[in-house]
Amino acid sequence: MEFIGKIFVMAIAAIFVQNFVLMRFLGLCPYIGVSKKLDSAIGMGMAVIFVMTMASTFTWLIQSYLLIPLKLEFLQTIAFILTIASLVQLVEMIIQKLAPALYKALGVYLPLITTNCAVLGVAILNINENYSFIEAILNGLFGGVGFTLVLILMAGIREKLEKAELPRAMKGMPIAMIVAGSMALAFLGFSGLKL
């Protein structure tokens, strides 16, 4: 029962309290770039969940069974980036084959998951927090869910704002930045939770 409670706390923390986009400010490029349409936001979110979970799995294994035993911890960033790039290539090929419309809608932002600092951030956080293998996988999963949640919320708001009457100077990126800041303030309210 204690483990389930720990998982619950980890989920709430990763999704709401320490959200990678709104609290740690990681992964802002796809957050702003892909959040124009709800369909592409959902597709990107699913891809990020998969990549974050798999990256957490493989990077933990690489760190624990390769880098530490061989005393090559200084290669951590390079090893993690290569792992993430390989996973993104796999996701890109799968999406291109199974959902060509989504592949086209995501455009340049799909390969940019490779350089999405949220994915690298979760991998390094797992090591720095000394998470066990299962905890690292779950932290990657919950971090991806948190990323997807804010991406979908932002896309929904931006789609509604496209139909709203706004001053011409506020259309597009200016209102998106105001909404992003407002969402970050709203999520800051979760930081008062005692977990």
Image (cartoon, helix red, strand yellow):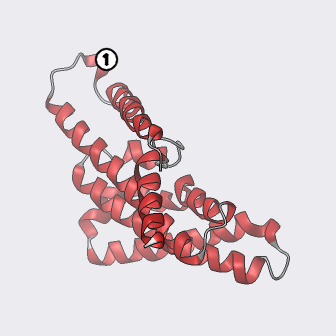
Q: Is residue 100 above or below residue 145?
A: below
Q: Is residue 143 above or below residue 154?
A: below
On the rendered image, what quadrant is the N terminus found in? bottom left
Residue 106 x %, y %? 34, 57
Number of disc labels: 1
Based on the displayed image, in which of its 4 quarters is residue 145 positioned? bottom left
Residue 30 x %, y %? 43, 49
Q: Is residue 99 left or right of residue 125?
A: left
Residue at 15%, 26% in the rendered image: 164
Residue sitting nearer the eye, 139 or 152: 139
Q: Which residue is mark 1?
A: 169
Residue type, label 1: Ala
Q: Is residue 55 visible?
A: no
Residue 62 x %, y %? 67, 78
Q: Is residue 178 left or right of residue 125?
A: left
Classify mark 1: helix, strand or loop. helix
Q: Is residue 133 left or right of residue 155?
A: right
Q: Is residue 188 visible?
A: yes
Residue sitting nearer the eye, 95 or 24: 24
Categorize mark 1 by other alpha carbons within 10 Å: few (<14), some (14-19), many (20+): few
Residue at 32%, 26% in the rendered image: 175
Residue 108 x %, y %? 43, 55
Based on the displayed image, in which of its 4 quarters is residue 82 positioned? bottom right
Q: Is residue 19 left or right of residue 67?
A: left
Q: Residue furthest right?
A: 71
Residue at 40%, 46% in the rendered image: 31
Residue at 40%, 65% in the rendered image: 49
